[in-house]
Image (cartoon, rainbow, N blue to C red):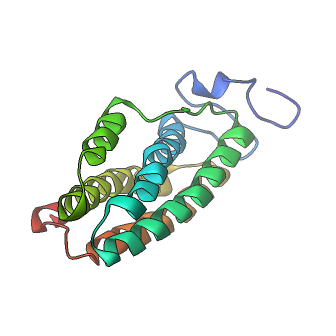
């Protein structure tokens, strides 16, 4: 531990539970920070790309809101990770890169549909991680971050659903 109660650089990424002055930090707590950072790494460029490729004005509007809010959430995730000594990724993962490539090949209504589907599925997946962390975390910093993240994700899912392009099967 260093003087401020955070594990030495990278020690928080070794797995298991790590003691911090804000309470124990679990593997699930770290998973949340990584998941939120990972989401921003592809959803920010996807939202920016939608400004040029989407044909539906509502999709463009939603994309702008989401990417701007992801910039804020990403900064929050990086600050919390730094405070807790968690190392975060710096580029989209393989699946996210594939989604960005897939979207790059689309325009107009085809782009609108794939953009909304991919982002809604991604938000649904991270929603479950956030909910688990919020209900189980004993770390006050991570729990507060989970609460802030949940507000963004709820907003983003509602915005994506407001486009009318989210298939019913995604809501089950």
Q: Is residue 160 left or right of residue 46?
A: left
Q: Is residue 58 above or below residue 78?
A: below
Q: Name the residue rendered at 54%, 43% in the picture.
A: 33
Q: Is residue 98 above or below residue 61?
A: above
Can residue 27 be seen here? The reply is yes
Q: Quadrant of the N terminus?
A: top right
Q: Is residue 3 left or right of residue 121?
A: right
Can residue 147 be seen here? The reply is no
Q: Is residue 55 above or below residue 53?
A: below
Q: Name the residue rendered at 20%, 61% in the picture.
A: 113
Position in image of residue 160 (x %, y %): 31, 69
Position in image of residue 166 (x %, y %): 19, 67
Position in image of residue 93 (x %, y %): 40, 32
Q: Quadrant of the C terminus?
A: bottom left
Q: Name the residue rendered at 53%, 24% in the picture.
A: 15
Q: Nearer the viewer, residue 34 or 13?
A: 34
Q: Nearer the viewer, residue 22 or 71?
A: 71
Question: How many numbered circles are shown?
Answer: 0
Q: Name the residue rendered at 49%, 66% in the picture.
A: 152
Residue 42 location, quadrant = top left
Q: Is residue 36 left or right of residue 57?
A: right
């Amino acid at each position: 531990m260093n003087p401020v109660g955070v594990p030495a650089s990278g020690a928080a990424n070794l797995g298991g539970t790590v003691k911090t002055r804000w309470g124990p930090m679990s593997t699930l707590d770290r998973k949340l920070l990584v998941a939120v950072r990972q989401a921003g790494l592809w959803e920010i460029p996807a939202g920016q790309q939608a400004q040029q490729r989407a044909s539906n004005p509502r999709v463009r509007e939603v994309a702008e809101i989401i990417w701007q809010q992801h910039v804020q959430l990403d900064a929050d995730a990086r600050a919390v990770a730094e405070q807790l000594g968690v190392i975060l990724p710096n580029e989209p993962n393989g699946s996210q890169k594939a989604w960005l490539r897939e979207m790059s090949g689309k325009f107009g209504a085809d782009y609108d549909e794939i953009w909304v589907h991919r982002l809604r599925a991604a938000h649904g997946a991270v929603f479950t991680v956030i909910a688990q962390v919020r209900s189980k975390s004993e770390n006050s910093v991570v729990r507060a971050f989970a609460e802030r993240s949940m507000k963004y994700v709820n907003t983003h899912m509602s915005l994506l659903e407001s486009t009318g392009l989210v298939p019913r099967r995604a809501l089950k």
